[in-house]
Image (spheres, rainbow, N blue to C red):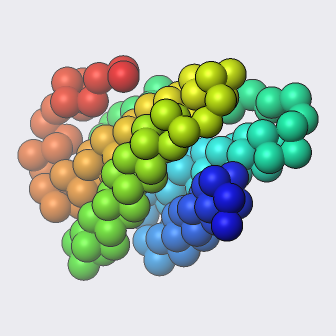
Amino acid sequence: MDIYDYAMKMEKDGENYYRDLAQKTTNAGLKRILTMLAGAEVKHYNLFQSMKKNEGLPDTDTEILANVKNVFIKMWEEKETSVDVSQTELYRKAQGIEKQSRDFYLAKANEVEASKKAIFVRIADEEKKHYFILENIIDFVSRPEMWLENPEWYHLEEY
């Protein structure tokens, strides 16, 4: 399996995992966030598919951090804190997947031609953002009262 096929499989698996998590949660805000993460994985899949075919590269820039932050703030303002704590391990697993993806893309960035290296690094950076989004979901699910005391997201910087 070549690098692009492997990357596309990872992104498709990530999309499916996020869509599955979105179906399992009853919290509308978390459902929106997980759906956004699934959509970001679709963009990554399309990017790698275009790279494999040597086509023009689609835009992969997402404003996922700003969008997710807005969803969390809306949840805080509306006191939408009913969450299923039993799903914490599922979010931790997703976080592990994001870390593995980031590490993979950073390693492969050194193996591809120079013109494609920046793209692999950029996708790795997006996976890092996903990791931190999941960290906030875990914090929110585990300790909603404590998390909501700090709606400024001081612990989630732009990377």
Q: Residue at x 27, y 64 (%)?
A: 92
Q: Quadrant of the C terminus?
A: top left
Quadrant in the picture for the N terminus: bottom right
Residue 82 visible to an observer of this rendering: no
Q: Quadrant of residue 58?
A: top right
Measuring from the top left, give residue 134's x and y in whole percent: 34, 51
Residue at 57% of width from left, 23% of height from top? 118
x and y percent of residue 4 in the render? 69, 52
Which one is in front, 108 or 155? Answer: 108
- Whether residue 18 is visible here, answered yes or no, is yes
At 16% from the left and 61% from the top, the residue drawn is 142
* Residue 7 vertical position relative to residue 89 in the rendered view, above or below: above
Left or right of 24 on screen, residue 51 = right
Vertical placement of 22 versus 144: above or below? Answer: below
Q: Residue 146 or 45: which is nearer the viewer? A: 45
Q: Is residue 6 above or below residue 78?
A: below
Residue extending farthest left:
146
Q: Is residue 135 left or right of residue 158?
A: left
Establish if 70 lies above or below 143: above
State how many labels appear. Answer: 0
What residue appears at the point 50 percent right and 56 percent down from the top-left corner?
34
Whether residue 148 sits left or right of residue 10 in the image: it is left
State the image coordinates of residue 18 (x, y, percent, origin top left).
52, 64
